[in-house]
Amino acid sequence: QVQLVESGGGLVQPGGSLRLSCAASGSRFSIYAMAWYRQAPGKQRELVARITNIGITNYADSVKGRFTISRDNAKNTVSLQMNSLKPEDTAVYYCNRADRQGLPLLNSWGQGTQVTVSA
């Protein structure tokens, strides 16, 4: 069973930056697209960014130009560099395998990492 462990969240002021990391267990990491999702209080989980197994990326409109997703297949990790953070980016962030439409493939999620953007 694949395990996902997210880290790197925290409290940051508007305009600040954070880098999130996700470590995935399992030997087939490199063949799957991976994605970051987030869930704000009272809202549904939404796709933030996706990266294919060969590094093609796409982003939600709300984060384009501010967030960058990357992966290291040798280390089974996927990262999310978040710059120019806004209060509306406050959420719990999760990673997961993703299909072509950006829907999560694994039913089991990690614990997520809390990002709070506040002055």
Image (cartoon, rainbow, N blue to C red):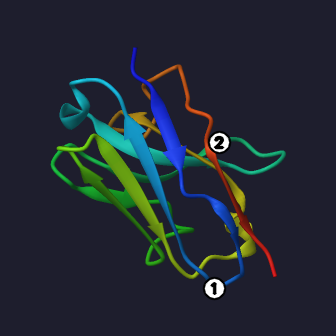
Q: Residue at x 52, y 19 (%)?
A: 107
Residue bearing mark 2: 45
The picture places residue 9, in percent across and down from the top left corner, at 61, 58
Local secondary structure at mark 1: loop
Dividing the picture into quadrants, the one containing residue 76 is top left
The Cα atoms of the two marked residues, 1 and 2, are separated by: 23 Å
Residue type of the residue flagged with mark 1: Gly
From the viewer's perspective, tell me whether residue 47 is left or right of residue 101.
Answer: right
The residue indicated by pointer 1 is: 15
Provide the secondary structure element on which disc 2 rests. loop
Q: Is residue 19 above or below residue 34?
A: below
Q: Amino acid at mark 2?
A: Arg
Q: Nearer the viewer, residue 40 or 103?
A: 40
Extreme residue toward the top, this view: 1
Which image quadrant: the N terminus? top left
Residue 89's x, y, as percent? 67, 65
In this rendering, which labeled residue sits more in front, label 1 or label 2? Answer: 1
Residue 56: quarter of image: bottom left
